[in-house]
């Protein structure tokens, strides 16, 4: 039954997808292709759409595949299944969080994990910023339009606090970047 | 009741304006939930990021559940999570039903060309905020630098390791540090 398959398939994705959508794409591909829901080519297209639309990529992908296989109910079940494990695990963490934080061993481990996770995020940010204007996986060719937009955005994001002005909110930055894209590439 | 509506609407806004996945979402969540609404502190934000990275599932969902629960218990966590999922769900339903050639539309292409440049910048910005709010001891700076370099190497050389490998290594290091401290205290 397609509804049950969608639910179980995306529950598996939700349970085992560590480290964000990009790290989880091989797992998603594995699940989706093994059920034979879509071809590899369609999946690549769906991943591209999921990256270009707002929201967590995994959620977008679940909705998209669910909808394509079994309409609204399919979309709902797949989305629910991909979200539910993270929701439940977080809730369980919250129940024990305060008592865990009193534990010395747990505090030391968290204390080491914090700078490590910040390092990961910094690295991913640097890599994705560079990837937007350099083809890092092939020819290392530069895209000058993207480079110009990135420089403007970096200035907009990091310069105001240097001059004692208020930080630009991330949402403003996103809207600004879309406008820049339209200005540089046309409609 | 008001807080439930507020949670739902705020997270719906966060979900609607976040492109490029959960890491870019971190700086939007930080801006809205820590700076503006003051629902959680910088330190909470760090803790939830650590938990989100060490547990499966979309990072944004972990954050929404955490903030929602802090503000209004289980009902709050449900509202926040539903809020952050709603825009994804509606936009994709719309696109998959109506627009078969979504990626071919020029204005969408152009706008996304710009947004793609912003995603990385937002993630760096989230990291910078976290570094600013971190206690800067030699040990934490060392862990931070090594993790950054290791992750960059994994990305650039497409190694068969992932972020979770680094997290496990950091956790093991944490246990080791605790064991050494504990031994020292014991021998006193």
Image (cartoon, coloured by chain):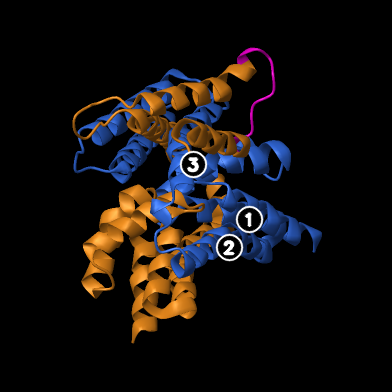
Chain colours: A orange, B blue
* Element carrying mark 1: helix
x then y, percent, for residue B66 = 59, 53
What residue lies at 73% left-to-right and 61% top-to-bottom?
B4
What residue lies at 68% left-to-right and 59% top-to-bottom?
B8
Range of residues picked out in magenta:
A162-170
Label 2 with label 3: CB-CB less than 8 Å: no
Do tags 2 and 1 sit on the same chain? yes
> On the image, numbered disc 3 is attached to which residue?
A187
Question: Can you say which quadrant of the picture contains the N terminus of chain B?
Answer: bottom right
x then y, percent, for residue B18 = 53, 46
Towards the viewer: A123 or B75: A123
Question: In the rendered image of this protein, does residue B168 appear above or below residue B3?
Answer: above
**Separation (CA) of disc 1 from disc 3:** 28 Å
> On the image, numbered disc 1 is attached to which residue?
B12
Towards the viewer: A66 or B2: A66
Classify mark 3: residues with Cα within 10 Å, few (<14), some (14-19) or many (20+). Answer: few
| Dominant secondary structure (helix, strand or loop) of the stretch shown in magenta | loop
> On the image, numbered disc 2 is attached to which residue?
B86
Mark 2 or mark 1: which comes first in sequence? Answer: 1
Report the chain holding disc 1.
B
Q: Is residue B141 visible?
A: yes
x then y, percent, for residue A145 = 40, 27
State left or right for residue B91 relative to residue B1. Answer: left
* Element carrying mark 2: helix
State left or right for residue B156 relative to residue B170. Answer: left
User: Residue B163 bears which disc, if any?
Assistant: none
Quarter of the image holding residue A171?
A: top right
Report the chain holding disc 3.
A
């Amino acid at each position: 039954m397609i509804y049950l398959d969608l639910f179980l398939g995306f529950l598996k994705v939700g349970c085992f997808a560590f480290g964000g959508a990009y790290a989880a794409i091989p797992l998603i591909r594995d699940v989706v292709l093994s059920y034979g829901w879509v071809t590899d080519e369609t999946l690549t297209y769906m991943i591209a759409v999921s990256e270009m639309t707002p929201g967590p990529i995994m959620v977008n992908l679940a909705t998209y595949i669910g909808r394509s296989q079994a309409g609204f109910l399919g979309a709902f079940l797949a989305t629910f299944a991909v979200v539910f494990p993270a929701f439940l695990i977080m809730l369980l963490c919250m129940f024990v969080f305060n008592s865990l934080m009193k534990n010395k061993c747990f505090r030391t481990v968290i204390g080491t994990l914090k700078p490590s996770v910040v390092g990961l995020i910094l690295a991913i940010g640097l890599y994705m910023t560079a990837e937007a204007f350099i083809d890092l996986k092939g020819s290392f060719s530069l895209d000058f339009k993207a480079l110009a937009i990135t420089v403007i955005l970096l200035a907009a994001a990091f310069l105001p606090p240097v001059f004692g002005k208020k930080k630009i909110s991330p949402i403003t930055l996103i809207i600004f970047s879309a406008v820049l894209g339209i200005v540089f590439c046309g409609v | 009741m008001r807080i439930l509506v507020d949670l739902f609407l705020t997270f719906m806004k966060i979900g609607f304006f976040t492109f490029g996945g959960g890491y870019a979402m971190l700086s939007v969540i930080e801006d809205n939930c820590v700076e503006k609404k003051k629902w959680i502190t910088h330190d909470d934000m760090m803790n939830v990021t650590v938990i989100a990275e060490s547990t499966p599932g979309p990072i944004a969902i972990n954050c929404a559940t955490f903030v929602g629960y802090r503000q209004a218990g289980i009902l709050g966590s449900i509202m926040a999570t539903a809020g952050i999922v709603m825009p994804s769900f509606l936009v994709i339903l719309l696109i998959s039903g109506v627009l078969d050639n979504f990626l071919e539309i020029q204005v969408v292409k152009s706008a996304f060309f710009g947004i793609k440049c912003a995603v990385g910048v937002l993630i760096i910005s989230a990291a910078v905020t976290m570094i600013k709010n971190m206690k800067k001891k030699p040990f934490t700076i060392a862990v931070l630098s090594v993790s950054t370099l290791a992750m960059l190497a994994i990305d650039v050389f497409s190694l068969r390791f992932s972020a979770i490998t680094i997290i496990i290594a950091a956790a093991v290091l944490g246990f080791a540090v605790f064991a050494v401290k504990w031994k020292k205290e014991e021998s006193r």
